[in-house]
Image (spheres, grey):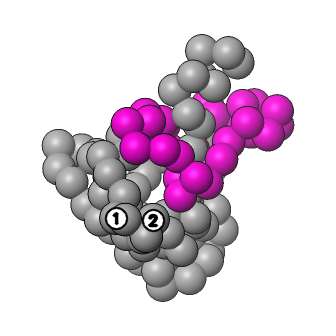
Amino acid sequence: MALPTESLITESLRPTLVCDVSVPLSSLAPGSRATIVDVDASTPEGHRLLDLGFLPETEIRVVRRAPLRDPIVFYLRGGQICLRRSEAARIRVLAADAEHAA
């Protein structure tokens, strides 16, 4: 099976992105909730994020950050996972407060 080389924007979330309200996951503060809208799958690291469950339309919560802001702990799909800021920056999300405003 060939892996996708482009970002995975779902059709149901595409109109939201036209308003450019999505932000990198790495920019959210601890305690923030969001919905994943896009994952940059153009590199092996991006493919690995998809394998780990960072898929479009998945709800996610920022649990905590390390003292120097790196790494970041996220809660999704019933478990916690820790990513570096550079890895989290490959994931675009729609913050929960932005979902209600759109």
Amino acid of disc 2: Arg
Amino acid of disc 1: Ala
Q: Check if residue 31 falls in the magenta segment.
A: yes
Mark number displayed over residue 49: none
- Against 35, is 46 above or below? below
- Against 51, is 29 above or below? above
- Against 45, is 35 above or below? above
User: Is the residue marked by circle 2 packed among few (<14), some (14-19), or many (20+) residues within 10 Å?
Assistant: few
Q: Is residue 49 visible?
A: no
Label 1: element kind: loop
Count the marks. Answer: 2
Whether residues under marks 1 and 2 lie with C-beta atoms below 8 angstroms apart, the answer is: yes
Q: Position of residue 45 (x, y in %)?
A: 47, 80
Say which residue appears at 17% left-offset and 43% top-offset. 78
Residue lying furthest left: 78
| Left or right for 82, reference 14 | left
- C-alpha distance separating marks 1 and 2: 5 Å
Q: Check if residue 17 falls in the magenta segment.
A: yes
Q: Give the residue pinned by disc 1.
A: 66
Label 2: element kind: loop
Q: Which residues are magenta?
A: 12-37
* 12, 82: nearer the viewer: 82
* 88, 55: nearer the viewer: 88
Q: Give the residue pinned by disc 2.
A: 69
Q: Is residue 7 visible?
A: yes
Say which residue appears at 58% left-offset and 52% top-offset. 27
Say which residue appears at 70% left-offset and 18% top-offset. 102
User: Is the residue marked by circle 1 packed among few (<14), some (14-19), or many (20+) residues within 10 Å?
Assistant: few
Q: Position of residue 23 (x, y in %)?
A: 65, 47
Residue lying furthest bottom: 44
